[in-house]
Amino acid sequence: MYRIITVCTGNICRSPMAQYILTKAFEDAGLSDEVSVDSAGTTGWETGRPIDERAAARLKQADLLTADHRARQFEPAWYADRDLILALDVDHYEQLRGDAPDDGARNKVRMLRAFDPKVADHGPAEQGIYDPWFGDEADFDVSWNLISAAVPGIVEHVRAQLATH
């Protein structure tokens, strides 16, 4: 099983949105038996809380239901357990890479938008998705669009990884 984790700050907005969007994309690609996606936050601020209702509403528009989601903090053991660690913004990227126990773990950390062809050749500082929590529904639409633009590239990356194993 190829394991992916998406990571934002509190695990109530961006990372669960990415988790559910990616899970559906892998189902649509016929890879749901080979790939699992989960999410976490770099902090424990929201631990145990459900997904932000604005994020849930945006996901529900695509028939993605999130009632079971509960926020949790990224655990160091997950560096070993995950094949790909996708940071949603540059501060998550820097923290995850800085906390990684070794180069192997550090190399698993990528910006989610590094897989978006529009910004793939940019550095991490230009690939972030700002926190929609401070905004309104329109900000969650922006997050949806930015995440969705990277999804085909992530699916193809994982498909290639699976082919080499």
Image (cartoon, grey):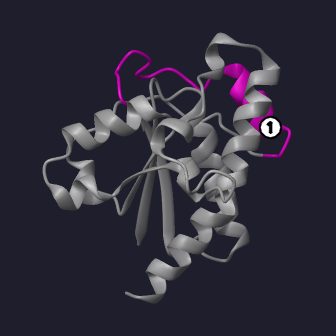
In the displayed structure, 155 sits above or below 62; it is below
| In front of the other: 94 or 160 | 94
**Residue farthest left in this picture:** 101
At x 86% / y 39%, what residue is drawn? 61
Residue 42: within the magenta? yes
| In front of the other: 51 or 132 | 132
**Residue farthest bottom in this picture:** 164
Q: Is residue 45 left or right of residue 132?
A: left
Quarter of the image with the C terminus is: bottom left
In the displayed structure, 31 sits above or below 132; it is below
Residue 52: within the magenta? yes
Residue 117, percent from left and from top: 67, 59
Quarter of the image with the N terminus is: bottom left
Secondary structure found at label 1: helix
Q: Is residue 140 left or right of residue 16?
A: right
In the displayed structure, 27 sits above or below 111; it is below
Q: Quadrant of residue 24?
A: bottom right
Q: Is residue 62 left or right of residue 48?
A: right
At x 56% / y 24%, what residue is drawn? 50
At x 20% / y 45%, what residue is drawn? 100
**Residue farthest top in this picture:** 134
Q: Residues within 10 Å of mark 1 (few under 14, many from 20)?
A: few
In the rendered structure, which amino acid carries the disc numbered 1?
A: Lys
- What residue is shown with label 1? 60
Residue 74 visible here? no
Q: Range of the magenta residues? A: 41-63
Q: Quadrant of residue 153?
A: bottom right
| Secondary structure mainly formed by the magenta segment | loop
